[in-house]
Image: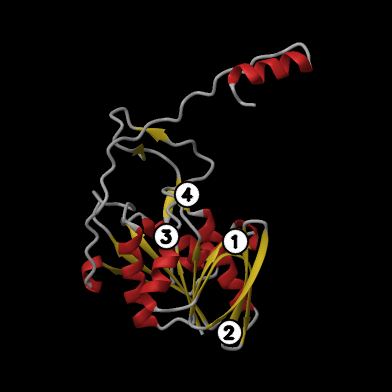
Amino acid sequence: MKILVPVKRVIDYNVKPRVKADGTGVDLANVKMSMNPFDEIAVEEAIRIKEAGKATEIIAVSIGPAKAQETLRTALAMGADRAILVETPDEVGSDVEPLAVAKILKAIADEEQPGLVLLGKQSISDDSNQTGQMLAALMGRPQGTFANTVAVDGDSVEVKREVDGGLETVKLTMPAIVTTDLRLNEPRYASLPNIMKAKKKPLDTKAPADFGVDISPRLTTTNVAEPPVRQAGEKVEDVAALVAKIKEMGIA
């Protein structure tokens, strides 16, 4: 069984994003970039499934600029077998909308015929949380979103989903689409020998046009701004003063 793992190049989660002075977007100049954390969890889970003898090949896919090769090499160093980069023009970069991403992934999945598509539930760059669901709809495949646990058993996969108030368990007939949540696993660090080996693993480069997908944006960002600065709190002397202040503010 093949496992397809889409990964996205985003601003490193340890970096505080800066808004451009003209408010047109986030400033990416000289900013550390890395693999989307949820996608990193998906790569780790795919590797664990393969190590358990339930998968034969892991294919990492990224849709973005040429520099996204670095993200794919990270996935290869972790344990993916080969990679595919669908390179987008510099002016588009990684800002491909979820529907276009899902269409490209469907085309790749139709070619590769994976038994499982494992991807992060969302990217920390836009927090759309749409690609996995759209891909499942386009392919007509069962989906298990927000996975807390993934267990492959023969031609099915059991997924424990994180839902409001607890966990929901679903059993999906493969091929299936699963999106990963934070508590699924802890991704491994790539060792130096594996980083060196990753440089020799195959990485194919494609273009959106190769799959007949138009990546022209359908949404326009009108303005990007920093969140308002949090105002200082106010101290009160006792509970009575606190209750009076709450009533004054109209909270209770």
> Label 1: which residue?
191
Colouring mode (rainbow / by chain / secondary structure / one colour): secondary structure
Of the numbered discs in the image, which one, if any, rests on residue 130? 3
Residue type of the residue flagged with mark 1: Ser
Task: Please name whichever residue, 245 or 200, is drawn nearer the observer in this view of the structure.
Answer: 245
Label 3 to label 1: alpha-carbon separation: 33 Å
Per the image, label 3 sits on a secondary structure element best described as: loop
Residue that appears at 36% across and 59% down = 98
Task: Please name whichever residue, 91 or 106, is drawn nearer the observer in this view of the structure.
Answer: 106
Q: State which tag comes first along the sequence, 4 or 1.
A: 4
Q: Nearer the viewer, mark 3 or mark 1?
A: 3
Q: Is residue 164 above or below residue 21?
A: below
> Label 4: which residue?
124
> Label 2: which residue?
156
Q: Position of residue 12 (x, y in %)?
A: 49, 45
| Other residues around mark 3 within 10 Å, as few (<14) / some (14–19) / many (≥20) | some
Residue type of the residue flagged with mark 3: Gln
Q: Position of residue 20 (x, y in %)?
A: 33, 32
Label 3 to label 2: alpha-carbon separation: 23 Å
| Other residues around mark 2 within 10 Å, as few (<14) / some (14–19) / many (≥20) | some
Q: Nearer the viewer, mark 4 or mark 3?
A: 3
Q: State which tag comes first along the sequence, 4 or 2.
A: 4
Q: Tell me if residue 4 can be seen.
A: yes
Q: Is residue 151 above or below residue 227?
A: below
Per the image, label 2 sits on a secondary structure element best described as: strand
Q: State which tag comes first along the sequence, 3 or 1.
A: 3
Label 4 to label 1: alpha-carbon separation: 25 Å
Q: Quadrant of residue 17?
A: top left
Q: Position of residue 99 (x, y in %)?
A: 33, 62
Q: Are marks 3 and 1 in contact (CB under 8 Å)?
A: no
Label 4 to label 3: alpha-carbon separation: 13 Å
